[in-house]
Amino acid sequence: MNKHQKNMLNEALKKVKSGFFYAGFFSLFINLLMLVPSLYMLQVYDRVMASKSLDTLFLITLIVAVLFAVLGILQFIRSAILVRVGNKIDLELNKLLYDRIFEQAKLNPAKVSSSPISDLTKLRQYITGQGIFAFFDAPWFPIYLTVMYFFSPKLAYFTIFAAIVLIVITFITEITTKKGLAEANILHSQSQMFLNKNIQNAEVIHAMGMRDDIKNRWLSKHLGFLSAQSDASSKAGKWANTSKTLRQFFQSLTYGIGAYLAINGEISAGTIIAGAVLMGRALAPLDLIVTSWKGFADAKGAYYRLQQLLKETEEKIERMDLPKPKGELRLERVVVVPPMSKQPSIKGVTMFIPQGSILGIIGPSGSGKSTLVRAILGVWPILQGKVRIDGSDIHQWDSVKLGKYLGYLPQDIELLEGSIAENIARLGKVDSNKVIEAAKISGVHDMILKFPQGYDTIIGPGGIGLSGGQRQRIALARAIYNDPVLVVLDEPNSNLDEAGEEALKKTILYLREKGTTVIIISHKQNILSTTNLLAVIQDGALKLYGPTRDVLLKLQELNTKNKSTQQKQKPKQEPKNMSVSLSKPSS
């Protein structure tokens, strides 16, 4: 861990340690006041009953009432402190966790989930719940034991024995449930992730009758989780009930022991009641630890998972603001390994893209075209080499600030919940003039006006309610919103009709006139005709690069040469009149 890295969870806990200190401070007085019921019983039985003085009874009852009022106020304050502590921890970490989830989504999209936010909730709920009070109250056990010793050493010894039994049960609970609870948490996470992923593909699953098969797979994972959780909960419940029963038994047995001691003249009759009440209070925190063990185990597991997630989080460094880029790109021997892969998809690509260039990228499917543009945009990390924008390493930029100057239309188009205007404005503050300008440039303005609420039309998750072509055209307007200096279009016409393609072509020509750098992945000739540079990617390597006309001529020469070679090798199997044409590389 370098000097810019720290355990952010521990840092957040350090910021609220004063809250825990105050909760412990109030616990001191709370536990001292917990002695009141025993002392009250002692005074009633030994003093009031002996003297039969109603004035004494009234006075000590009034004092006890006041003390119980103070006790209630102190308990309320302690609870309020812990609620604020829990909220403070949440506020310190929720944005950081949100960022980490998205960072994980880039590096390991198959395993990403929102479970860290759930873990933070579990931790906060435990801190604000009843279970944590046991850890504040248990350290005051020696105070109760000391008072018990003054009542009778034998009652103190019996209390120690009962406490040891409950502590042993606590350790047994930990040992017998730890593995099961951990397994249940893992299975629950897998089950939820599997369900969420398939909900996103509900249309395909429904159309091809896959629902029952998918349901059976989910059910298998879910039943595994239920089995593991039920087994762990059953064991925890068994020991919790044992602890509760034994505590009640020990407390009742105190009456018998006290009676024996009173008969022998070692204690008074009032001490019997006071000792039993005091013993119950002394053992209550230990019993609460056992009965709330599942909540504690869940919180502890959440803590360790959050710690693991955040321990390598770099402390955010305030970077000096760089001037607005112009759009010049330089790739220096770039090597990229996609997430969850061990083999590079881009192998040493070097390329210079002047500002205002319209670059087309073509190549066979799986050749690394989309991987290359993701590296250019800083979405995927670079194993070796550099991507520079206006001479600066793209990773020297704050990604949020740089993103304001970039536009991206990916293959898999995802519109977000909100209005059409909000989507075009990238869910930021909607500037009506800029939104309409982007829509007009991309040729989607008239289409939007035909919707019932126009730009205020609400889009469902993922763009529900829109056709593929409509989503693609709105996403194009989003990509060019606020005049980005670099626009990347990955198969921008895959869902477009003739009118949509014409609008796309006009948009690219507009960007070229404006001096915007544009990168287009496509194999359709009408879009490639707008480019002035063309790159051919094959097997992750840059095979050809240069002016579009020169690269196309070179490809045609290579195609002609290949056809000629094939005709010589298989003259009898080839048609006599073979027209030579440029084969269109697939996307």
Image (cartoon, grey):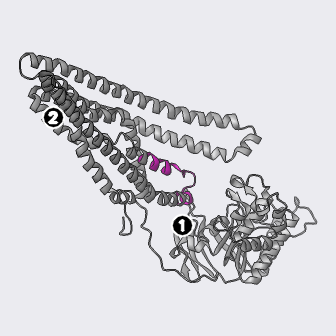
Under mark 1, the amino acid is Pro
CB atoms at circles 1 and 2 under 8 Å apart?
A: no
Between 217 and 149, the one nearer to me in the picture = 149
**Where 553 falls versus 103 (above or below)?**
below
* Left or right for 102, reference 291: right
Q: Residue at x 79, y 65 (%)?
A: 493
- Whether residue 25 is visible, yes or no, is yes
Disc nearest the viewer among 1 and 2: 2
Amino acid type of disc 2?
Leu
Residue 83 vertical placement versus 570 (above, below): above
- The residue segment tinted magenta is 103-123
Q: CA distance from mark 1 to mark 2?
A: 61 Å
Residue 583, above or below 388: above
Residue 450 lies in quadrant: bottom right
The residue drawn where x is 32% and y is 41% is 72
Say which element carries label 1.
Answer: loop
Residue 157: give x, y in percent of width and height.
13, 28
- Asked whether residue 413 is in view, the answer is no
Q: Residues within 10 Å of mark 1 (few under 14, many from 20)?
A: some
Give residue 145's quadrant in the image: top left
**Residue at 72% from the left image edge and 42% from the top image edge:** 205
Quick check: is 122 in the magenta stretch?
yes
Circle 1 sits on which residue?
381
Q: Residue furthest left?
A: 265
Query: With 94 as the anchor, is 63 left or right in this view?
Result: left
List x then y, in percent, for residue 74. 30, 45
| Labelled disc at residue 145 | 2
**Residue 109 covered by magenta stretch:** yes
Residue closest to the eye, 358 or 289: 289
Label whose residue precedes the other's in the sequence (1 or 2): 2
